[in-house]
Structure formats: C-alpha cells, structure tokens
C-alpha cells in the first residue's frame, strides 16, 4: 500500500533520512520505532507531502504520492491522522472538531448529517453525546485523545497515521487507546502507520515493526520476531539499555 525507496531528507547540515526503504502492506498495522529526533515524524510528513524529500521515491497504492497539483486533495482524502498532542481546535466544540473534514471541500456534508456522523464516531471511541457540545478544554487528556481518534476515522480513510498516540496518558488510559486503535484499524480494514517509542503500544497494535535509526531502517519484521532478532539496535531500544550502538546523546 505504501512503499518508500531510498528516501532522503536533510535540513541544512542535518541529515534526518539517509536512504529509507520500507514497504507497508495493505491492511497492515506498521509501527515505526526509534528514539526521539530520529526522523519518525519527518517520515510521515514526507509520505503526506508536507515535507518534500531530497531524493527517493514514495508510492501509495502503486502511484507516486501526490504532493501537489489537481490530485492533491483526493490524495489527502485517503488519509486520517491522530496527532501527538491531539491538535484539537480550542474554539470549536467537540462534534465540530470530529466533523471538521466532513464540513469542508467538494464533498461537504449538510450540518445535521455531519453532526450525526460525528456523534457516531464519538460513540465508537467510547464517548456519548453529552460531550459533543463541550469544548476541548473541558475534557481530560484521555478524552481529548479519543476525540482526536474519532476525528481521524470520521471520513473512513483507507490509511491512518498515529503520531505517538499514548503520549501524556497514564498507563490505564494508554491501554484503552491502544485497544481502540487495534479494534478500529481491524474493523475498517485500514492500513495503519504508527510512530512511537512506547513499547507497550508497539506490542498492542503492531502487525509489523520497523526500527528507524541513523536515517535508515535498521530492521523490519513481524512483531512476533522483534524480541528474537539479534539486531543490536533493536535489542538496545526495546530493552532501554544505555549501552549499545545507539547514541545516548543526540
């Protein structure tokens, strides 16, 4: 579904991606692991066309990623995104946050239909209609994350990106969000890419795992093989060891 071939990206003298090769099969939940500052978010932004790679090729469903031009809007319509910080609009009530995409563009839905769709997605993430007219500031961190998830799936995208989905949550709520992500991705048959350094999330939601370090994918494989791989980068990261090939000062 998504393929990256020799993708490179630098910012000035700082090389972030240095020849990334990665294949994400259709309907698979791929989790990208790696330390802070290793380029995980840049990788997602390159796929979406928010950042232009310096070299390499990115294809989605066999076609080059539409980074500009008349096909750009249709390309982005295929994606949903759960942002690390929630990224909810403070000035909009919850239901309008969830329905934000549904009320814009050529496929804009009538207000009543958009609200009904938003309420349905809120129910799917475990929130009832009583929160629909509240504002984000009136919600807990866990509830805000659920609203963000509802927004990510509101347009029923083919591909969903999750950027550090459990950051800032307590272990119980993080577990709830992980379970919701797993259930929703499976139900929708969506292709998912998640970036995280939370190994509990990795084990809960991944079908496949890829390790990004030094600007390249050091290892990739099924989640069942992650603990068994002898790769020193993977073993240092998943066990949180200070000693190993990964630099502890970035």
Image (tube, rainbow, N blue to C red):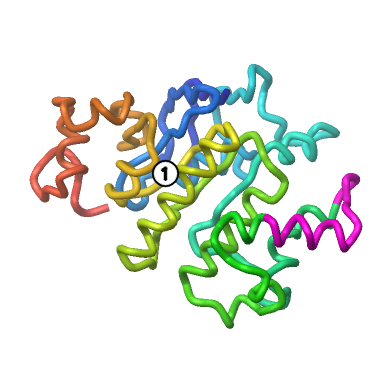
**Residue depicted at x 57% and y 31%:** 189
Per the image, is 1 magenta?
no
* Quadrant of the drawing holding the N terminus: top right
Q: Which residues are magenta?
A: 105-120
**Residue depicted at x 64% and y 48%:** 153
* Residue placed most toward the observer, 69 or 226: 226
* Residue placed most toward the observer, 203 or 63: 203
Q: Let me know if residue 12 appears in the view.
A: no
Q: Does 172 sit left or right of 101 as displayed?
A: left
* Residue placed most toward the observer, 24 or 157: 157
Task: Estimate the x, y position of residue 45 in percent, counting from the top left.
Answer: 57, 43
Q: Let me know if residue 140 appears in the view.
A: yes
The residue singled out by tag 1 in the image is: 39
User: Above or below — where is 136 with respect to 33?
Assistant: below
Q: Does 223 sit left or right of 230 as displayed?
A: right
**Residue depicted at x 61% and y 76%:** 136
User: Above or below — where is 156 with respect to 114?
Assistant: above
* Residue placed most toward the observer, 230 or 17: 230
């Amino acid at each position: 579904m998504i393929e990256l071939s020799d993708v490179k990206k630098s910012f000035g003298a700082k090389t972030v991606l240095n020849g990334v090769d990665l294949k994400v099969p259709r309907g698979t939940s791929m989790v990208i692991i790696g330390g802070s500052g290793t380029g995980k978010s840049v990788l997602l932004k390159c796929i979406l066309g928010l950042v232009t790679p310096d070299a390499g090729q990115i294809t989605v469903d066999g076609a080059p990623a539409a980074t500009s031009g008349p096909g750009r809007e249709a390309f982005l319509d295929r994606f949903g995104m759960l942002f690390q910080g929630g990224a909810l609009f403070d000035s909009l009530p919850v239901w309008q946050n969830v329905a934000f995409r549904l009320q814009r563009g050529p496929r804009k839905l009538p207000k009543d239909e958009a609200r009904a769709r938003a309420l349905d997605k809120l129910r799917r993430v475990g929130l009832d209609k009583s929160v629909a007219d509240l504002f984000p500031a009136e919600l807990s961190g866990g509830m805000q994350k659920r609203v963000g998830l509802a927004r990510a799936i509101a347009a029923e995208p083919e591909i969903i990106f999750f950027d550090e989905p459990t950051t800032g949550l307590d272990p119980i709520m993080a577990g709830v969000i992980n379970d919701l992500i797993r259930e929703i991705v499976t139900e929708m048959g969506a292709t998912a890419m998640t970036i995280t350094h939370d190994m509990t999330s990795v084990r809960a939601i991944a079908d496949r795992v890829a390790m990004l370090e030094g600007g390249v994918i050091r290892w990739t494989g099924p989640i069942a093989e992650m603990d068994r791989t002898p790769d020193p980068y993977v073993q240092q990261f998943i066990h949180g060891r200070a000693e190993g090939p990964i630099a502890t000062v970035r």
